[in-house]
Each structure stands twice: as C-alpha cells, then as structure tokens.
Amino acid sequence: MGNILLYKVQKYSDEYKKVFKGVYDDFKNRSFSDYKFELQPLEYEEFIDYVNDGFINCIVLLEDEIPTAFMVYTTEISESLELNIIHCLGEENINLKRKLLLEKFFELESDLLAKKVTTYPMLGSQETFVPDIANYGFKMVAVAVLRFNFKNPNSIETFSKFRPPFLQPEYELTGWKNEYLDEIVNVVYSSFKETADAKFDPRFASIDGSRDIVEKITQEIYGTFLPECTSVILFNKKPVGVCFANITAGKIANVPIIGLIQEHCYKGLGEIMLHNTVKNLLAVKQMSLDEVNASTETDNYPALKMYRRLGFKEDYYYPQAYRPAGMPTYSSNDNEQPAIS
C-alpha cells in the first residue's frame, strides 16, 4: 500500500509563510515559460503584503500540512471575479488539486458568485484543466495573441508594403484628446456590448462598465498610456472609432482595444487606425520598443485578417474561461480529502 496523503484547502495564513515561499518561488520561476506572463510577478514579500492587505486573495492547498499548490484571485478590480492563476508543484494529482482549490473558492465566494461573472484566462499549462473546469459551469472563448515584432524583417516589410484604404472626406484621422473621453466610452460600448468579450468582461455590456475600462486605460491602471500613439477616427468631427496603445511591460506595447461604432464598420477604418498606431509606435525612437501585441477571438476572422495584413503574427492561443453569474455553486462539507499516493 502507498502512503495516504491528506489534502487540506484553506485561505492563506501567515503560519505557513516560510514554507509557502517555496511554492510561490516555483510559480515565479515558471511564470514566463509555463504561464506566458509578460510582467515579472510580485516579489514574495510584496505578494504576501498584497494578500494580507486584501488587494488579492490566495487559497492554499496543503499536502500533509505542507503547501504544494495555490490559487490567486481578485474580487474588486472589475465587475468580474477574476481567477489569476492556479499553480501546483509538480504534476502528481494536478487536476485533483486544481479542483479542490476551485471548490474552496466556490465555498468562500458563494455570495459574489451569485452576482458576478467569474473569469479565468487559462494561459499556458493551465489549458490542461479545461475538460475538468467545464464540469463546473465554465464556458470557453478561444483567444489568439498576435505580435508585431519590430525586429522581424518580414513583419517590417509587410507593414511597409501595406497601403491603408482611402479616407473619405467626412472622416478624419487624429490622436487622443481628453475631451473625446465621453464619446469614446460610447464607441467602446457600441463596439463590444454584443461580442464574446462582454461574456467574460461584463463591463463591456454597459456604459458605466465601458467607462471603467476606458478610464483604467487612460489613467494607466493597465500600463503606461500612449496618447501620442493612440488613433481616433472622427466622423463629421465626432469620434466614432479608437485604437488605444499602451506599454504593458518593459519594451512591449499593447493594443488593448480597437473599436468602431457599428455603422462605420467594413470601411477599412480599423486598418487605418491600426496602421497609424503601429506607425506612431515605430516612430517613437526613445522608447526602443521590441514589439506590439494584441488579442482577439480566434473566430473573429475580419480582425485576424486585419492584423495579418499589417505584419502581425499569431503567437499562441489560450482558452478564456468564464462562468455566468448565478449558476449553482459547488459546496463541500469536508475540505480534507484523501488521495492515494
């Protein structure tokens, strides 16, 4: 007979602070290779401070009283409950450990689960949990991450050969101005309210939520905002489209949103804005950027074609999981569950 392992799942407690550091450091060392992180994770002491101050939540799985896995999630940043990472030491019983962490999350946040969508970007090796997490009411949106490498000759050549569509006289291409904010909020809402994005980020489904997204971009919550590289399309002097640009990590720029009011779609305006934004990013020499990236659903063929025509290449894909609010939640009467080793 093998040894019986006793799993216990609970919220992080400082009594495990010293031994938990080993699990966290393992995650930190694998954050880029296994989880596609672009930003360096918090240093351990800073992470613990964030947990203790309530900015993030951490659930720990103990194996014979030794931490071997954890889940991190947030409840206050947006209208969703956001699962950030589920990490386990090694591969033994990995999906069982993930399920136990998820079930504890359901138990702790049952009230919020009744009111909020739960989202979980299953980046990198977390993708192997998809068949199991679907049994807990999660649905999937397949997302493609695209990159324009500023040092790739093929991308530069593709971009240099691209000729944006002719801009009709009633339209004007310009840059960001703070006075556009209210109308850009309406652009974002009109563009995304009925898309897959609104399923896993319900802020897109309301004006107030769309305002929260735009303000977090322009107030640099999601990275360094680049107003000089952001492109806006005016129709009869009124904003009807936007292509935001920011810096999310080091020398990596990002296009977080391209949006157009519906009646102005299919006129090449998205290509015009994206071309102008990439051109501006290439021109800002002092930033010495390595790349600009963007993401879109894999079945959004017009967007994928647009990015490809301008020199972007698909880098990787991941399942964006989301769980609608109000679904029945799992409830466990016993947090200590044995498994055979």
Image (spheres, helix red, strand yellow):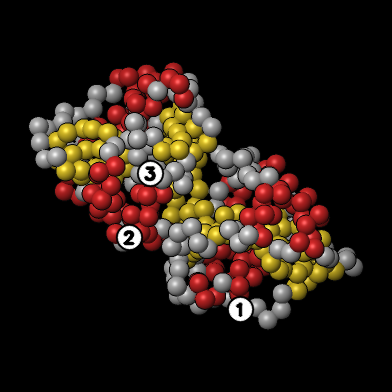
- Does 51 sit above or below residue 307? below
Label 1 and label 2: CA atoms lie apart by 33 Å
Q: Which amino acid type is marked by label 2?
A: Asp
- Which residue position holds label 2? 208
In-image side of 168 versus 69 (left or right): left
Residue at horizontal 41 percent and vertical 49 percent from the top: 216
Front: mark 3 or 1? 3
Q: Position of residue 89 (x, y in %)?
A: 74, 52
Q: Residues within 10 Å of mark 1 (few under 14, many from 20)?
A: few
- Which residue position holds label 1? 331
Q: Position of residue 11 (x, y in %)?
A: 69, 67
Q: Position of residue 28 (x, y in %)?
A: 68, 44
Indicate the quadrant where residue 304 lies.
top left
Element at label 1: loop
Residue 216 visible within the image: yes
- Which residue position holds label 3? 218
